[in-house]
Each structure stands twice: as structure tokens, then as C-alpha cells.
Amino acid sequence: MSVPHTRTEANDRPTRIRVDLDALSHNLRALQRHAGVPVMGIVKANAYGHGLVPVALHLQAQGIAQLGVAFVEEGIALRRAGITVPILVLGGIHAPQVTQFLTHDLEVTVSSIDKLKQVEHAAESIGRKAVIHLKLDTGMERIGVHSEKSAAFIAAAVASPWCIVKGVYSHLACADDPASPMTREQLQRFLAACEHFDRLGAPMPLRHLANSGGVLHFPETCLDMVRPGIALYGVLPDPASQATVVLQPALSLVSKVVYFKVVQAGRTVSYGATWTAAQDTRVITLPIGYGDGYPRSLSSRGEVLVRGGRHPIIGRVCMDQFMVDVGPHGTAYNGDEVVLIGRQGEAAIPCEAVAQAAGTIPYEILTGLNERIPREYSGGHAASIGTPAA
Ligand SMILES: *Cc1c(COP(=O)(O)O)cnc(C)c1O
């Protein structure tokens, strides 16, 4: 083999994200078994904060059928890192970028007749056919041709000499909620539009519709391929979601105590003096803040695990630090590990709980954790974690 891949991208910063690659493998297999069809693993937004390239390399080594990203830049980064499996770019295309899809062997989402023409033009001009997935709108009112008016769009794509129609897809708006009637309506609209391929005597492309919520709650939406994102990382999309598949959270966020002090009764903590000590109490400082993507909305609302106990964040979360009350009798020492997301002994703070305390969804918590935090990978097969591109 060639250059060893730096599997530990971490520096010495005490704050870090730990990614358990074996949890990813487990979730991939569990979702695939549950869906009964191949998986397009969604790795957009830095693989939901888990690290785009290491996650993609691992999923590829696990034999994943296909990957999906949001933007062409993410697809190019994956190709440069040695990813060879098919990659679909899910987002809407910008005309000046279309050639880049073709030169990097990225599959294109075509979401209108106009965009089809742009892709044909680019493909013809460089003499290379485009592999495309047609995007139908069945209820999101985001990108895509309204499914009930898609006959001409589908006919034009099928007839195009410069496009290979590999897939047709749509996106579910309410699949997080098992009780929503919207998903079945969207499925019906989607299947009705797919009949145009039969009418045209064209081969049926890969039909894909299900995101994580679809896979978890609506097996009938799984069709020919599924597109789970958040569930692949072991996190449920929404508090209403049901854990119909046993998932393992892949990400932990940890830090270490950097300061310990006693705060006297009546003193206030952090910016704005929003929190006042009711009694003398012991307070630790952690070296992570909203500048890392740890939400400021957790000010006096979030919790962390220290020495196996659960303790509240007090006062405002700062850009680079925040404070935690370990209580009048609590102990903690500089250098003690603190868990912000994940498990410590018997106790756990799942990403879902952090999201709820912050008044948002797990997606925003995960994708918000930014590049300032080093990421550390465990599990997986060292030999199959490939080599970085030169
Ligand atoms: C982000 C995305 C997904 C994955 O959604 P999850 O809810 O994370 O499973 C699937 N399909 C499309 C088109 C997306 O944009």
C-alpha cells in the first residue's frame, strides 16, 4: 500500500469529536437490512459533522452502493480523496458548474427542462455523457418538476442523446413523523409520475424516495434505493420518530476541565450576569463554545457529564468557553474528561437531547460542529481505510 492515511486527524486540543466507525458499519447494515434495497449514504455537510472524507472512505470500504452530497464541491473533494463509488449531487445545479460534474464523474440532479438543456449542452461540448437523476417535486415545493406535470420533462430526458437517466427521485417532507398522512400522498404522486417511463417504453430508472424517516417509518417508500443521512450516524430525525431500527450513535463530543473555582453565593457567572449562585458552589470551565458550533442557546439550559454525574451549564455559553456548576460538594480536577454528547459510564447525553435543550433539531447540532474541533476515528479496518489523494 502507499502513504498511510492519518486516521487520527486530531491535534492536542482537549476538545474533540470521536467517531466510532464500527457504529457507522452497524447502522449501514441495519438500515440496509430493514430497507431491503441498496443504500445511498448521505454524507453532505461534512458527513453531518462526522468528517466527509474519513466517513466516505469507511462507507466505501463497507461496500456501500452509492454516496450522496449536496454540492458539487463536496463531490469533488470525495473524488480527490479516492472515492470511486457513484456519487449523486442532490442540490440544484448552476450552469457555470455543470462541466465540473462531468469531469469529476459526478451524477447530476436534473430538476427542470431548462437544467436538462444546460447539462446536455455541457455534455455535448466536452463529448462525455452525463449520468443524471430526475428530480420530481411531490410536496416539498423545493427543487424539482411538479410530478403531475412531469410527462414532457421525463420524455425530454429519456430522448436526450447526451444524458443517461440513471435515477428518478423525490424528497419526503414529513417522513420523520410516522403519523403524517403526507408521506403516502407523496409516494402516490411519485409512483404515478414514474408510469411515464412505461408509457414511453423506456427502462425504469432507479426510483428513490426515502430519507431516514422514510426508511424508519414507511417501508413502502424504500422502492429501489434509499437515501438515509441522519440515521446512518445513529441519530433519530425527530422526537416523534420511532426507533424501528436499532441504531448506534457514531459521534461523541468531549472536552476537558481547564479550570476549577469556588463561586461565592450572590456572584454571577458569564456575560450578561444572567446566572447567580444561590449558595457557594464549585464551577468548572470548559474550553469549547459557540465558535466551535456548540450552541449558545444551551446557555443555562444544557448539561454535561463529569465524573459520571450530570451537571448544568450555567450562564451564557461564550465563544470559546462555558461554565458548569458541579455543586457545593462536587469534585472535578483540571484535565478531567467531560462529555457533551455521548456516554460516560452509565450516563448518556444523546444528540437528540442536546437538540431539544437548544430548541433545534439534531441535524443542526451535528452539522454545526465545525472544523475547529479535531476529529478522531476508532474502529473500522485500518487496511481498508484507503489512501488520500496526492
Ligand atoms: C439530506 C437529504 C437526505 C437525507 O436526509 P436524512 O433526513 O438525514 O435521512 C436524503 N435526500 C435528500 C434529497 C436530502 O437532501
Image (cartoon, rainbow, N blue to C red):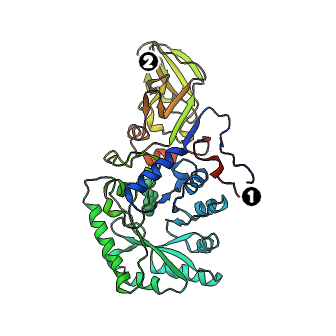
Position of 138 compared to 277: left or right? left
- Mark 2 close to ligand 1, CB under 8 Å: no
What label does residue 346 carry, if any?
none
The quarter of the picture where residue 358 lies is top left
Indicate the position of residue 181 as horizontal and vertical percent values.
24, 60
Badge 2 amino acid:
Ala
Q: Which of marks 1 and 2 is in front?
A: 1
Mark 2 residue element: loop
Please identify the quadrant where the C terminus is shown: bottom right
**Residue 360 % position (x, y):** 40, 44
Image mark count: 2
Residue visible at 53% across and 66% down?
Answer: 89
Specify the quarter for ligand 1. bottom left
Return the residue at label 2: 277
Where residue 192 appears, as percent x and y from the top left, is: 30, 76
Does residue 303 show up? Answer: yes
Residue 40, compared with residue 307, is above or below; it is below
Is ligand 1 within 8 Å of the beta carbon of the residue shown at mark 1? no
User: How far across and down, in percent of the image, does residue 323 sit?
Assistant: 51, 26
Q: What element carries label 1?
A: loop
Q: Quadrant of the N terminus?
A: bottom right
Give the vertical position of 261 relative to 225 (above or below): above
| Residue to which mark 1 is pinned | 390
Q: Is there CB contact under 8 Å for labels 1 and 2? A: no
